[in-house]
Amino acid sequence: MTIQDRVALPEIAEKTMVLATDLDGTFLGGSPEARRALYDWIEENRDTVGLIFVTGRDPEFIAGLVEAEGTPWPDFAVGDVGTTIARVSPEDGVEPIEELEEQIAAIWNDAGDAVRARLDGWPGLRLQPTPFRYRVSYDLDAAEFDEGAKAAVEEMGHDWLISDNRYFDVLPRGISKGPSLKRLMAHLGIAEGRVLAAGDTLNDYSLLTAGVPAVAVGNSEAPLKDALAGGDHPRLYHATGHGCAGIAEAITHFDLHPTGATAHAK
C-alpha cells in the first residue's frame, strides 16, 4: 500500500473494525505463516480495518518495526505501557498527541529522577537505559527480586507493574494500556463494539478488561490467565491459536468483519 493510498483511507472511526493489539507475543507472535496471513489481510482491507499498536515498547521501536518485521503501518499507537498516545504514519513517524498526554504528564510530574534514586541498587532490578518520558522501567531478576520495591513505589504515589516475570515498570498512578486506549478511542470517536483488543502478558490486563471485545491469545502467560480468571469479563475470548492466529480466531469469534473467516482460514 502506497502513501497515496493511505491518505485516501476513511477516518479510523468510520472503519468496520479496529485492531488494538499488543506487539511482543501477540501481533509479533505465532508462526511466520499466521503472521503473514494476518498482515496481508489487514493490508487488503485497510479501507475497513484500523490498526492501533498498544505496547510497552517506546516510539523509536514502533517507528522501526514496519521495516524490521514487515508489519502493516499502524494508524495510532499507545506505547510505553500506556504513557505515550500518538499518531503514526510513514511520513511523520510517531507523533505524540499532546492533548491526550497532558493528564499523564501532570500525574507523573517529572518523577523519573526520584524513582531512579529510590530504587537505585534495589535487589533484582536493573534499570533499562532508554530515557522514557513518563515511566521508569527495569529488567527484573525474579530470583533476586525484593518484593519491598512494590511498597516503595506505592509510597511514592505511583503504580508498579510486573510482566512476563522479567519486567518491572513504574507508571503514573492510574495510567496503563487500557485507560489510555479508551482515552484515544474517545478522542477519535471509535465505538467500543468495533474494537478488538489483543494481548498475552500481565501488562495487557487493563487492555483486555477495558470493556471492548478482547482476546487473550493462546500463548498468554499464566499470571495473565490467572488474573483474568478472577473476574467477570463477558467480552473476553480465550483463543487457542498463538499470536496472530489467535487474533484472527477472535475476529471470527466476535464477527467483527465480514471477511474475518477468511483471515482465520489463511
Image: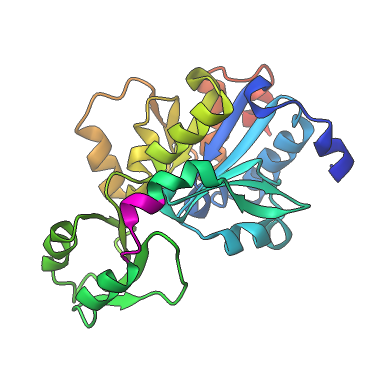
Where residue 87 sits, quadrant-wise, is top right
Residue 122 located left or right of residue 131: left
- Residue 120, given in percent of the width and then of the height, sits at 24, 80
How many circles with numbers are drawn on the protein? 0
Residue 26 located left or right of residue 230: right
Closer to the camera in the image, 264 or 48: 48
Q: Is residue 95 above or below residue 147?
A: above
Q: Residue at x 29, y 44 (%)?
A: 174
Q: Residue at x 69, y 21 (%)?
A: 259
Q: Is residue 77 visible?
A: yes
Closer to the camera in the image, 156 or 28: 156
Where residue 235 sits, quadrant-wise, is top left
- Quarter of the picture holding the C terminus: top right
How are the colours assigned in the image?
Answer: rainbow
Closer to the camera in the image, 121 or 27: 121
- Residue 17, given in percent of the width and then of the height, sits at 61, 24
**Which region shows up in magenta?**
105-111
Residue 83 located left or right of residue 163: right
Q: Is residue 95 above or below residue 265?
A: below
- Residue 142, given in percent of the width and then of the height, sits at 23, 69
Q: Residue at x 59, y 63 (%)?
A: 61
- Residue 8, given in percent of the width and then of the height, sits at 84, 31
Q: Is residue 70 above or below residue 87?
A: below
Q: Is residue 239 magenta?
A: no
Q: Is residue 109 magenta?
A: yes
Residue 207 located left or right of residue 165: right
- Quarter of the picture holding the N terminus: top right
Q: Is residue 119 visible?
A: no
Where residue 155 sits, quadrant-wise, is bottom left
